[in-house]
Amino acid sequence: MDKMTKILWIDDEIELLKPHILFLEGKGIEVNTANNGSDALSVLTSLTVDIVSLEEMMLPVIIMQ
C-alpha cells in the first residue's frame, strides 16, 4: 500500500486556492490548510506532513512565533 502524501498549505487567502486544493485531493494527496502562522504551528504539532507550502509573506509571522 502506498503512503498518502500530506501537504500543509499556509496562506491567508486559502479560499482562493480551493480549485488547486481540489485538484491535489483528486490526485490522492491529503491537503491540510492554515490561514496564519499560529494555526500552522498548531497543525504541525498534531500532524506529520511531507510538504509545507506557504505564502512568502507568512514566513516572518511563523518565525516570530
Image (cartoon, grey):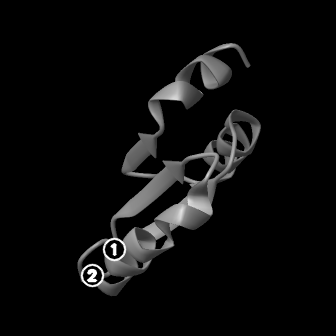
Residue 51, above or below 63: below
Q: Residue at x 38, y 70 (%)?
A: 20
Mark 1 in CB contact with mark 2 (< 8 angstroms): yes
Q: Residue furthest front?
A: 16
Q: Is residue 30 left or right of residue 2?
A: right
| Marker disc for residue 38 | none
Q: Residue furthest top?
A: 64
Q: Amino acid at mark 2?
A: Lys
* Number of on-image labels: 2
* 11 or 34: nearer the viewer: 11
Task: Report helix, strand or loop for mark 2.
Answer: loop
Q: From the image, tell me which residue sits under label 2.
A: 27
Residue 31, above or below 11: below
Q: Quadrant of residue 64?
A: top right
Q: From the image, tell me which residue sits under label 1.
A: 24
Distance between the alpha carbons at the discs numbered 1 and 2: 5 Å
Picture coordinates of residue 37 (x, y %)? 68, 34
Q: Amino acid at mark 1?
A: Leu
Q: Residue at x 45, y 52 (%)?
A: 49
Q: Quadrant of residue 6?
A: bottom left
Residue 31, above or below 42: below
Q: Residue at x 32, y 81 (%)?
A: 28
Q: Residues within 10 Å of mark 1 (few under 14, many from 20)?
A: some
* 10 or 41: nearer the viewer: 10
Picture coordinates of residue 31 (x, y %)? 47, 67
Picture coordinates of residue 34 (x, y %)? 64, 52
Check the picture and name the quadrant holding the C terminus: top right
Task: Report helix, strand or loop for mark 1.
Answer: helix
Q: Residues within 10 Å of mark 2 (few under 14, many from 20)?
A: few
Picture coordinates of residue 30 (x, y %)? 44, 71
